Image (cartoon, rainbow, N blue to C red):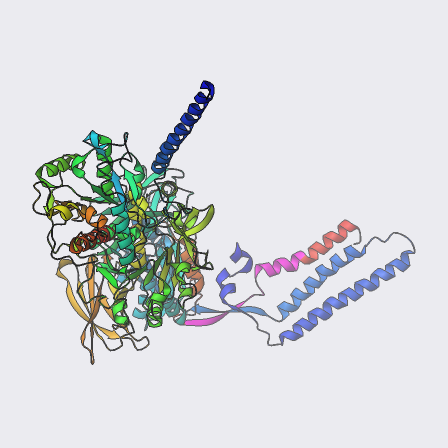
Amino acid sequence: MKLSRLAFVFATAGLCCGALLCAVRLHAFQRVGDFGFGNAESSTNVKSEFYWSRLAYTSSMQSYGSYGGGYWGRTSWSRDYPKADRQFLVAMHRLTRIDGRPTEQVVRLDSDDIFNYPWIYAVQVQTWSFTDDEAKRLREYLLKGGFLMVDDFHGTKDWENFMLGMRQVLPDRPIEDLQDNDEIFHTLYDVDSKMQIPGEHYIRTNRTYEKDGYQPKWRAIRDSDGRIMVAICHNMHLGDAWEWADDPNYPEQFASMAFRVGLDYILYGMTH
Amino acid sequence: MFSLLFKYSLPVFTKGHFVFLSGWPAWLLVVLIVLSVAGLAVLIQYRLKRAAVETQGDAVRLSTRRAWVLWALQGALVALLLVLVWQPAMSVAELSSQQNIIAVVVDNSKSMATPDADGKPRETAALNTLQSGVLDGLNKRFRTRLYTLNGGLNKVESLSMVTPAAAATHISDGLQQLTEQTSDLPVGAVVLLTDGSENSGGVGSGSSIGLAALQALRSRRMPVHTVAFGSSEASHDVELEDVSVAASAVANARLAATVSLQQHGYTNTHATITVRDGDKAIAVHDVTLGAPGVIQTEPLFFSAGAAGAKTLRFSVETLPGEENRDNNALTRPVLVSDGKRRILYVEGEPRWQFRFLRRAEEEDPSVQIVSMLRTSENKIYRQGINSPDELADGFPVKAEDLFQYSGIIIGSVDASYFTPLQQELLREYVDRRGGGILFLGGRASLSDGAWGASSLGDLLPTFLPAGRNNFHRDPATVSLTQQGIDSPTVRLLEDPQKNAERWRKLAYLADYEDPGTPRPGATVLAEMTGGRKRMPLLITENYGSGRTAILASGGTWRWQMLEKLGDPSHNLFWQQLLRWLVADTPGPVTVSASARTLSDQGHIDLSAQVHDRQFHAAPDAHVSAHIIGPAGVNAVLEMMPSQETPGLYTAAYTAEKPGSYLAEITADAAGSKPGKLGEDVLTFQREDGVAENFHREANRTLLDQLARDTGGQAWTAATAKNLPRDISYSEAGISVRSVKELWNMPIVFLLLLSLPAAEWLLRRKWGIV
């Protein structure tokens, strides 16, 4: 093969690779640019009343990635994403009359688009960090009537890190432990007795806790009228329970409890 | 001048009857006149022809036209002579001298103390008129009785007892009282000296003489001679004419009031209207005063505030140089209730609209949302219920269960979710019970919920479009219609134009549903534009005793989430819309009163419409009214059932003291199912001396009408000197019918001389003497 022909082949291959990379980047851009009210043309992004909205936040642990780098890679906010979300939505469709989109929606705090989604879900919140504008936007979101459910953070250190961000958003709001008779546990299912819901590590370790989070903490932050605006699931991992619900090794009682609590939280958010 | 020519005064001719004293038949006079005049015509015709023959072509000096002029003059003279031969006369009823009483009634209300252009109070002018010969003239021929007129009629012995200090002018009541007090006296006529500021109906009720008073006067043929004092309009004054505001409201509801005012001397001047609850100003409205003497109407909107019986004071600021500063304010009693109106919200699926609507109403202490939400196929999540049993079996199937709610919201619910019985209950709820139903747009709402094809299709304020694909999860922008701009229901900002602008800038709706076209009689308050199509958004309609509305969207929640934090638009909109929905929904007991403000008198009629638990008229209830008033007034009245209207109970009460009164009406069921049916409360007030501050300008129109309707005459201070002479022609009292011969009237002699003289002069001029 002549050198010139070899160069042509390499050049062509390079161009193809470049085009492929561009396509991937464009795909990522379109996902970001696709925030909004869905698309009537799409079978998955169908316009609906309810969107399972997962909060994508900047992480205080840059190695886990952030908006700017590795957005679709392994990041804190996308733990269990999207399988947990979609399996939960399957259950929601079967068990409620909520007109929800079958696929999740990613929302971010650097845009007012978040105000179109009055219910959001966040995980690994011990790693979240906010700029002043993001904290202000989340505060306004909650005070206007938005609902936030946080999940999958464990132990004392995680709580402290979570609270660093939370105090940036709501400096003065007290956090309380929810009682079994709280309305949030009775909107669709009466969840009177609750257990610690472990992540998928339970399959291997038979442990329900992670780190030093031995006891499940069902907590909340209320607004000035006593309505819950932040539901906190500390020392447990509902997202994993949804994600691994179809694994025969993951105990059914954990998955069932996680679905019931998740549906109660959504119904509470849509009725209070 | 009239009397000089005609010998007698005008009333002789206006009140008397024309007669011939000769006894010969009147037809004969007519025949003779016709024959005479015709004979003259024939004679003239004959002489004209003869003259033409004799002259044979020479110019005829007496033309035909001139000949007929002469004929007319001769004919008139002959006719006049013939009429005189028949002895014409006027037969008129005349009061017998010294046998009749003339009632001299002097208005001594406060308005008579008003100084007019000459600087003298009206009362002084009235007394001067009487003392400058009128009273003496009357006394020469009649007996006179002096009265003062104010809120009633009082007999006085001398004019020195008349001082203009009374708090009211009730001309009708006074005249009626006069007829009653003098029923056995020969009153020949009434002389009424007043400015005509009648205010028996209170401020803003207009002024006229009551029918009862007119009938009493007419039955005695008693003429009222009015003597008007005062100028017809003030030179510099702003006056509140009336204030219209609801008698009751729910706490914090948005109240609409209409203030009517007029001015003289302040055209294009800016003024401020203020509404006060006690010392607190609750609304301020700037106006530019319009044309003088023209009623100007200004709308006002304000919050009813906390619950309680309130006396709202509406005032327009006093302008420099105002002649009357006491007519710039009016008060109105308003009862603000804190009883929560319960609205049943039926929602077929979890929706953000449901959640944000509930949150908006949680801020409203006057409305409570009782909701039933279908969370899953077989589960209903209930909120706002009073007991575990409420709505436990789903949507009510009994009238007494459904009719307890003041309003109903139907969300994304297919019409088939309701059984035929429940659909009929919904119709009865609006039509008979007088409730309000609001239909929301949604996935299973309106046409997409097959409501158009249901038995309740005509309940909706629109003709729904065909098909079930009219709901779209696409953005829609909103704006107000002109009716919406004028409506308090959709008022987010005080200023109507700023409010319209605010609506145009509201965040777009998350979804919309085409509601079709409004029915005749429906009102479109707001519109939306979605998919490049303009459609009604908020449509209201009165149906039967109640009302229905459509809000053709389930996406107003974006107004809460997308507008700035703290923006009240979303919550305010819902609070006002739902207050409109329930504001006019009656309770089991609905009380009303003949008046809310009693001016200078205390009589009030109370009536209560009582319904049983199925909202049928309750004719056998026990109804009582507990009245609490100023200075410890405390009374309990039994209200009696009406014989004509089932379920209506009435009672009369007299509020003796000025101040605010509260009437609590309670109805208890009798018969087989005893128990309390319901209660209602109303407020009213008695004001003494306030109405007299208004309409102080002389009401000559009223006095002219009174004189005309009773056979009297309208006089002024300048013409009243002739009153003693002309007043004697009356059929009231002791009167005799006198005959006034007309042959010797100066006008007759003048005609007898002037007609031949005119003929002679014309003949001289034309050269045919």
- Which residue occupies 39% across, 30% down? A22
Picture coordinates of residue A126, whole percent (x, y)? 15, 37
Picture coordinates of residue B709, whole percent (x, y)? 44, 64
Q: Who is closer to the viewer here, B554 or B542?
A: B554
Q: Is residue B738 magenta?
A: yes
Left/right placement of residue B509 relative to residue B684 reads: right
Picture coordinates of residue B275, whole percent (x, y)? 27, 46
Q: Who is closer to the viewer here, B375 or B128?
A: B375
Please count the marks in the image.
0
Q: Residue furthest front?
A: A1
Query: Which quadrant, please, contains the C terminus of chain B?
Result: bottom right
Q: Residue furthest top?
A: A3
Q: Is residue B518 magenta?
A: no
> Up-down: is B765 above or below B502?
below
Left/right placement of residue A164 relative to residue B118 reads: left
> Up-down: is B499 above or below B110?
above
- Which residue occupies 87% across, 51% down? B59
- Which residue occupies 39% across, 69% down? B215
Residue B85, located in which quarter of the rendered image?
A: bottom right
The residue range painted magenta reads B735-754
Residue B418, located in which quarter of the rendered image?
A: bottom left
Q: Residue furthest right?
A: B56
Visible in this render: residue B678? Answer: yes
Left/right placement of residue B105 relative to residue A146 reads: right
Visible in this render: residue B245? Answer: no
Picture coordinates of residue B363, whole percent (x, y)? 22, 50
Q: Who is closer to the viewer here, B550 or B684?
A: B550
> Up-down: is B283 above or below A92?
above
